[in-house]
Image (cartoon, grey):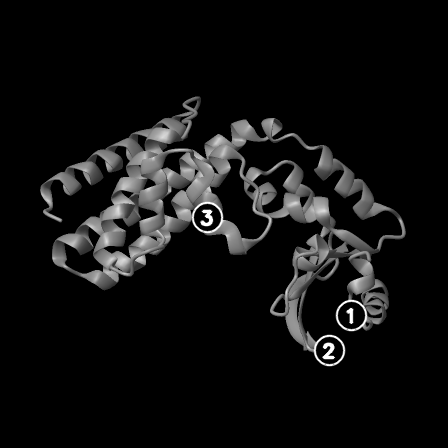
Amino acid sequence: MTVLSQLPEWLPDLTRLWAAEEGVLAVVLTGSFARGDADEWSDLDVQVLVADGAPIGGHTSYHGGLLLSVDRSELGHRERALTDPDTALWNLTALRTGLPLYDPAGVFAVLQAKAQALEWATLAPEAHRQAASRIAGTAEELHKIMGGLNAGDGEKVAYAALGLMLGLGQAALLSTGTLIPTENRWLTLARDAWPDAVWRESFSCLAGLGTDSPEARGRAGLTAYGRAVALAQWPLDFEQERREYAVAHEAARRGAAFLNRVVP
């Protein structure tokens, strides 16, 4: 039995309605239903590809007992997955596994073929730049964690740890070219992106996997930051990149010094 044969009976009617809307080029099933691993709590994800300049936006609703998530986006936005590493991480798997429900001119078929043929090596140089920028950009969160730990302010530490986790996790994924098939696996994918035991342990704690102590998460965040700085590749071709390198390494040094002077 194919995936398409298992879809709700009302989907073809909705597809015809979407296809008749202004500027619609293709309607594509993505997410867990397209991959074939949906369960009773999964939402049904539909991407409506429209011509540049046509109305865009997204909405969710319950339909036939399922949560339906519809995202109208310009074809040009989806094509960014072929050139922009951050967009690629979140969209390449969806493009590669998407199932066309409506594609009269083969627009999605062409996009899918390009996505399937794409080699991460072509995006790697820019991916390393984006990863380095994200690490440097979380130096402020690192300082907030140190300030919160010093003041015994668990709320401040917890909030800063959240931002640090998101920034470092995405940097790890970018640095290694680890695609995100579903946001449900983002934490474990980020944790396992770098094959480094210290990174994995500290990021797990930073993410709250195994602890709910703000202090423990904050201290783990300082360690995770230092490992991210050490593991990432740092392009130094431009002045902005050299400034980010200097900021990140100084922040890592301060984080390590703070851990050495604070008694656990």
Give the image location of residue 10, x and y in percent.
81, 73
Give the residue displayed 25% in from the left and 36% down from the top: 252
Direction from residue 142 to residue 97 in the image, left or right: right
Instruction: Give the residue pinned by disc 2.
Output: 64
The image quarter in which residue 131 lies: top left
Q: Please state which amino acid type lies under the numbered disc 1.
A: Pro
Please report whichever mark, 3 or 2, sits nearer to the chain's N-terminal start.
Answer: 2
Direction from residue 151 to residue 157 in the image, left or right: right
Please report whichever mark, 2 or 1, sits nearer to the chain's N-terminal start.
Answer: 1
Give the residue displayed 59% in from the left and 27% down from the top: 121
Instruction: Give the residue pinned by disc 3.
Output: 188
Direction from residue 182 to residue 249 in the image, left or right: left
Give the image location of residue 247, x and y in percent.
29, 34
Q: Does residue 51 appear in the picture of this structure? A: no
Q: Please state which amino acid type lies under the numbered disc 3.
A: Thr
* Label 3, label 1: how far apart the Cα atoms are: 31 Å
Q: Are marks 2 and 1 in contact (CB under 8 Å)?
A: yes
Instruction: Give the residue pinned by disc 1.
Output: 8
